[in-house]
Image (cartoon, coloured by chain):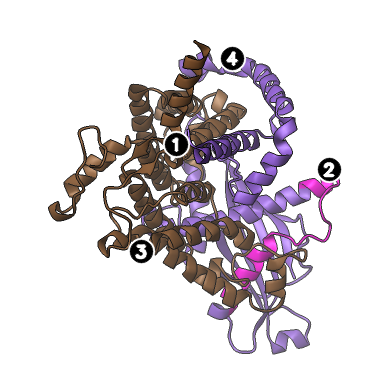
Amino acid sequence: MSASRWFISLLLVGHVVALTIEAIPPPDSAAASPEVRSPTRNAVAAALTPPLDASIPTVHRLHQLAWDGTAWARGPATWYVGLTGLGQSWRMFMDPPKYDEYLQVRYYVVNADSQAGGRIAWTAGELAFPAHREDRVRVFQSFRDSYTDKAIAMAIADSMGQRRNRDEAAIGDADAPEPLSAVAKFFSQRFAARHLMPGEAISRTEIWIARAGNRPPGSPEQPAAIRARRAVLEQYYVGPVENGPSGGQLPRNGDVFQEADLTWVLEYIHP
Amino acid sequence: VSLTRSSKLLARWERFWFQDVPPHSYALLRILFGAIGFISVLGMTPISEFWTPGGLFSPTAGSGVRAQILSSGLGDLIGTIYFWTMLTAFAATALGYRSGTAVAVAFVGSVFQPFWNRLPLSSAHHVVVVVLFCLLWVECERVWSVDAWRGRAKAVGASEPIWPLRLIRFQIALIYLNSGLWKLTGEQWRDGSAVHFASALNVFQRFPYDPPAALDLMMTIGTYVTLAWEIAFPLLILLPWTRRLALVMGVLLHLGMAFVMELGPFSAIMIASYAAFLPPETTAKWGMRFASPARRPRVSDHGQPV
């Protein structure tokens, strides 16, 4: 074998080893060992769930062994994978949410008259996420919408992760920007460009997030609940929902309101 | 005896990594990933929504290059240039126009995209990066390219080493194994309910119906088959007949996912990556059927260019 092939061989081995090592996540990122469950909804789940649940402690032990056994090379591997941009995580759908998620942006609009009286002229709510109507089949437009959905889903996940780190583990940068601010800024600018009259301005933007549980497998369908939720969503599909002047106290982070089975929680106020 | 054994091992190693193969597999991957990359960049439009600071754009912190660009007020300009550069690079990659430069620009641009704005990027982006990385090391413009048509590429019919193709195969296998092992630690994959919950999610659901209760058994089987197939993928691709089974299952699974869920370019990218698993000789022979007779390089019975 030629000298150049020896050299390339060395690089190939290093490449493969580095990617393999980097693919092993830290053991503390794996879920805790579970109780062995015995579902009864069908024969296949009943037969396979207990042995799979029982295998998890062994999987964790092997994971720990792989992690410890490759500790010596992790530094260079991380450096190499970072340098080449080949780092990746494949946790997609590892634990699919058991709920539907929605994000609504609410705008508080002021004009010269209302500002003089310290009032809000009018408010509106816009359903920003998901980007598509869920009462129709998604075809071509939904491909483009998937990027908007991904961006908002990522901002929500980042925001929740940031709060968890701050609240539970007391880690994270206290001055780090709120990920949901990107969503609030983008939609409020778009709303202002499309819907405000001259002399009007948005004085406050709120991000409300709602979750509604999905039916577990094997349980009876709930057409009435779906109809009720769709009736609520229908009004948002035609565009931002305008409300009258806001009276009384403005909502605070953590406040909730209910629409059908959607419990909206105020998660972020901008600015 | 040991000398003979080590010589044999060395010869096998050399054949495994350095065997010459027709360049068609690389050309096919270039075209597929260039085209999907181009459509993906187009999907991230308007530019003001995904590429410039006023859009759905990761908020800035710290004092890195990105923060400095944004604080200097050049964010809109750089974002717009970034978009057009990526669009052009992927188009040139697909067409095989100045392919070496195009692939390099598409790769570097893709690597830095998460640093510029990671919000709209899904797992599909990682697959594009790893395939482009492997294409950097070959002359993937030798066939089916504007470069070849204009005579800019090296001789049509010349071969390329197989190692970049093997690296792509390794990467795809690693992706499935990694993804399968993560899934195994998720309780819904173990109790067979993952496909039900994933296909019921409003963000992805393509049809306005929840999975019917009557399909529960099918969804449970689908969950376990997916889990087993992902974890077994690295083993299944080792033998020719199991490889065929793994790839056919993969195509069906990704087509099924694309049919019931809107996952952006993910399914198309995963199926496109299977081009790396086709024997290069077979890809070359299939390609010959579509090439015009005048430009067909001759391929021997063993698939080697002659």
| Subunit that carries the residue with mark 4 | A
Q: Nearer the viewer, residue B32 or B103?
A: B103
Circle 3 residue: B97
Query: Element under label 3?
Result: loop
Query: Element under label 4?
Result: helix
Hue used for the chain lettered B: brown
Query: Dot 4, how many residues are within 10 Å of its Cα: few (below 14), some (14-19), or many (20+)?
Result: some
Q: CA distance from mark 2 to mark 1?
A: 42 Å
Q: CA distance from mark 4 to mark 2?
A: 33 Å
Circle 1 residue: B166
Amino acid type assigned to the residue bearing label 3 in the image = Tyr
Residue A169 image label: 2
Which chain corresponds to the colour purple? Answer: A
| Between marks 4 and 1 in the image, the one whose residue lies nearer the viewer | 1
Sequence-first disc among 3 and 1: 3
**Is residue B145 positioned above or below B225 on the image?**
below
Q: CA distance from mark 3 to mark 4?
A: 56 Å
Sequence-first disc among 4 and 2: 4
Instruction: Left or right? Give the position of B290 relative to A137.
Output: left
Image x and y of residue B300, in percent:
21, 37
Residue A50 image label: 4
Same chain letter for marks 3 and 4: no
